[in-house]
């Protein structure tokens, strides 16, 4: 049975390896200590909401959402920045459960939306998100600037 819970500091040992694997999936070098420190800071400073999926006592997936704000809507928007399921547990509907919990967060906090982005090459994600009610935006361009 899969259960979803909100991460606390006590969950760092469970979630850090998943977060590290998520970063490796996106072609970053493994850094378990850095992953743990990063997550500890987000949780301690209340800068994100992290939901962890457990199969029994084993953490098998997570999603992390950051609050941002929409001036035109005058409301909070949740940025679903991270979603990852351990390879041994994919195809069991866990991603959909985490996405549904994320949508419930938006409802519970009276947010305007949940937004996310994924690489064009992420075939699984690009099938998953529309199947759970997310709409692909084609009327805006997303730009970014990196200082380094």
Image: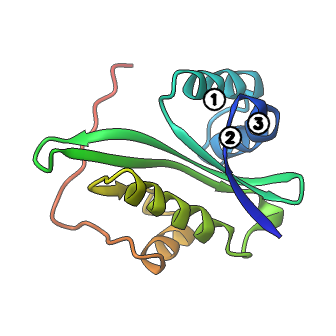
Please name which of the two marks, 2 or 1, marks the residue nearer to the observer: 1
Q: Residue at (38%, 71%) from the top-left corner?
A: 134
In the rendered image, the quadrant that contains the C terminus is: top left
Could you tell whether 50 is left or right of 115 in the image?
Answer: right
Residue 130 screen position, x and y as percent = 42, 76
Q: At numbered mark 1, what does the secondary structure look like: helix, strand or loop?
A: helix
Secondary structure of the residue carrying tag 3 is: helix
Looking at the image, which is closer to me, 98 or 109? 109
On residue 19, the disc is 2
Colour setup of the view: rainbow
Q: Position of residue 51 (x, y in %)?
A: 62, 49
Residue 39 badge: 1
Of residues 107 and 39, the one nearer the viewer is: 107
Which residue in the structure is indicated by mark 3?
11
Tell me the quarter of the picture where residue 76 sits. top left
Q: Position of residue 16 (x, y in %)?
A: 74, 35
Q: Residue at x 68, y 40 (%)?
A: 19
Assess disc 2: are there few (<14), some (14-19) or many (≥20) residues with their C-alpha within 10 Å of its C-alpha. many
Q: Is residue 116 visible?
A: no
Do the CB atoms of the residues marked 2 and 1 lie less than 8 Å apart? Answer: yes
- Is residue 36 at all visible to an observer of this figure? yes
Q: Residue at x 17, y 58 (%)?
A: 140
């Amino acid at each position: 049975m899969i259960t979803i819970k909100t991460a606390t500091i006590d969950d760092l040992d469970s979630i850090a390896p998943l977060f590290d694997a998520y970063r490796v999936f996106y072609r970053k070098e493994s850094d378990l200590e850095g992953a743990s420190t990063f997550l500890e800071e987000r949780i301690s400073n209340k800068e994100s909401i992290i939901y962890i999926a457990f199969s029994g006592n084993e953490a098998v997936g997570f999603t992390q959402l950051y609050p941002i704000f929409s001036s035109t809507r005058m409301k909070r928007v949740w940025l679903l920045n991270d979603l990852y399921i351990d390879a041994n547990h994919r195809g069991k509907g866990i991603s959909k459960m985490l996405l549904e919990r994320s949508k419930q967060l938006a409802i519970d906090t009276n947010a305007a939306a949940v937004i996310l982005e994924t690489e064009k090459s992420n075939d699984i994600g690009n099938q998953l998100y529309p199947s759970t009610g997310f709409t692909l935006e084609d009327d805006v361009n997303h730009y970014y600037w990196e200082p380094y």
